[in-house]
Amino acid sequence: MKSAFNQREVFEGASKAEIIERIQQLVPPGSPEPQDPEILAALKTLTAQLITAYQADGQLESEPFSDVRDRTIHLYASAVSSQIKGKTILITGGEGCVGSFLIKKLLELGATKIISADNARCQNPEENLPVFNREGAVTFYAADIRNCEALKHIFEVEKPAIVFHLAAQRQPGLAEIKIRETVTTSLLGCKHVIQLCEEYGVEHCIFSSTGKTSRYFTTEVYAASKKLAEWQFAKAAQEGDVTYGMVRFTHMLENSLFCEQMSKKVEQGKTVNVHAPHRYVTAQNLIEAVHLLLNSLVVSVPGKLKFVAVSNLGWPTETLEVALYKILECGKDLPIYFQGLLPGYEEPFFLGQFDWKKPTDIHLLINVLEDPFRSVNDTGDMVSVELAPFSLPVLDKQVSKLESLIIDPDFPEVQIKHALVAAEKEVIASSFAWSAPEELLKILQWGINPKKLQGYGTEIADYSEIIQLLLQGICGRLSQEVLHSAGVTADEFDDLVESLSTLDVIQAEVGYLRSLSRYLREFAPPAQFTTKKSEPIAIPDAA
């Protein structure tokens, strides 16, 4: 592909948007990495121009994640030390980034016997007697948590009193390729850990999850499998004897895939690939992560699953800004291009995730239905939350059905993904059935605001599945009182129905909403729904 780029077309006053558009014209998203010398030269020029444009806006003066790297969370060290004193502690995934640092911190706090179960050195996942080696106070087992007998052997020999369950697929992109491994690790691994914790009388079990589970619905394997895991632990907390806790992590700086990839490209002097412009991430550091895990031991309570997260994640950081800073810092004349979104990162952000009546209180890892359960600790740096209610029988049925499919080695991986999403839908539907219809109505209204969707470059059809689930939870439950409680005016309700009418798959639900609208127009008091609300305030999409 030859370039139609003219060097003279580049002018110093070009805006960020104009430069980005020219880069995408040269190398359309989805194209292979450019090799043509003329195109690479043009990309270098445009990249330098983009850096200048960012600097003109006061950006790139410091490392974009510098504020995140300097943050910390208060550790209830004394309380944690009392909890772990003289006890055996098991960590699944103990040889990973977070697991390794957790072990180090536990030793500092006085732990004398730590067990790691990790598949990093596991030669045979089906080996029921896992090999191990002891290094001082730490014993490292080579075991796959999907192998219940191997895990049971560890419990039988070591008798842990505290368990940190960290083992999981960590790469959303790889999860879309290794679907069976990801889902079985999440579903069966959690089942085995819970089962053995109950059987061997474990006192505390802390599970590490992801902020991506705050989405009401997702078709991504990584996030959907984690949602099923969260529900499993919530059920265990209600029905079992163990005290369970959970942590929701976001992007981990010390374990950042995209930062690592960008740094490698910069070091090698190669073209730096960025998924897309206007993609943002929230981030945290390793110290925060480990402090959350340890604090969860202190704040967890019997009978319910509380999860903790960083209280103030700060403003999301643009991945493009990170790439430009790395190039600027190295002093090399390097080009960037936008490769396009990859599987596992393609899902558009649903604006109904947050309560836009309180934009300054929005937390990017907590959705509207979870937010009423939010509380902040005494030091103000950690939040404690609970999952929105859901049906335990529905979860049981869906997990059992999914398990029967994924243990069949001949069941196609792509069908595993479909089955996972189908199971997730059923549990979400049960959660929406528990939720107040006025909350679901507000979520729907915020989620499909036409002006906001246009600003985000998405359209209502991109959210058809979550819209269907919300309407399933709403239909038959709306009334004049519900609309009034939600603060939705008659005009706003009509606008909502009009927007929904563009989706062919929900015409029956739209018919119900139209009937309700006619009823309200005919019978509602004239002034009941006339006050217009202010427009919600937009924040950047957190990818």
Image (cartoon, grey):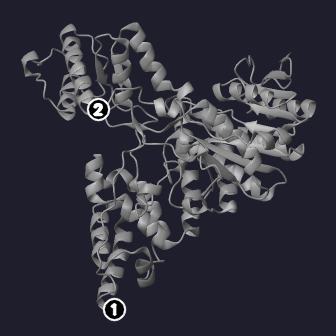
Cβ atoms at labels 1 and 2 below 8 Å apart: no
Gap between marks 1 and 2, in whole Å?
A: 56 Å
Pick out the residue farthest to the front. 379
Between 489 and 468, the residue placed more toward the observer is 489
Residue 160 location in percent, x, y? Answer: 87, 36
Residue 362 is left or right of residue 490, and the answer is: right
Label 2 amino acid? Answer: Gly
The residue positioned 62% from the left and 42% from the top of the image is 209
- Tell me where residue 208 sits by quadrant: top right
Up-down relation of residue 119 to residue 513 (above or below): above
Q: Earlier in the sequence, mark 1 or mark 2?
A: 2
Q: Secondary structure at mark 1?
A: helix
Label 1 amino acid? Answer: Phe
Residue 484 is left or right of residue 131, and the answer is: left
Q: Secondary structure at mark 2?
A: loop
Q: Which residue is mark 2?
A: 58
Residue 416 location in percent, x, y? Answer: 57, 40
Between 263 and 403, the residue placed more toward the observer is 263
Between 103 and 416, the residue placed more toward the observer is 103
Q: Residues within 10 Å of mark 1 (few under 14, many from 20)?
A: few
Up-down relation of residue 82 to residue 504 (above or below): above
Q: Which residue is mark 1?
A: 523
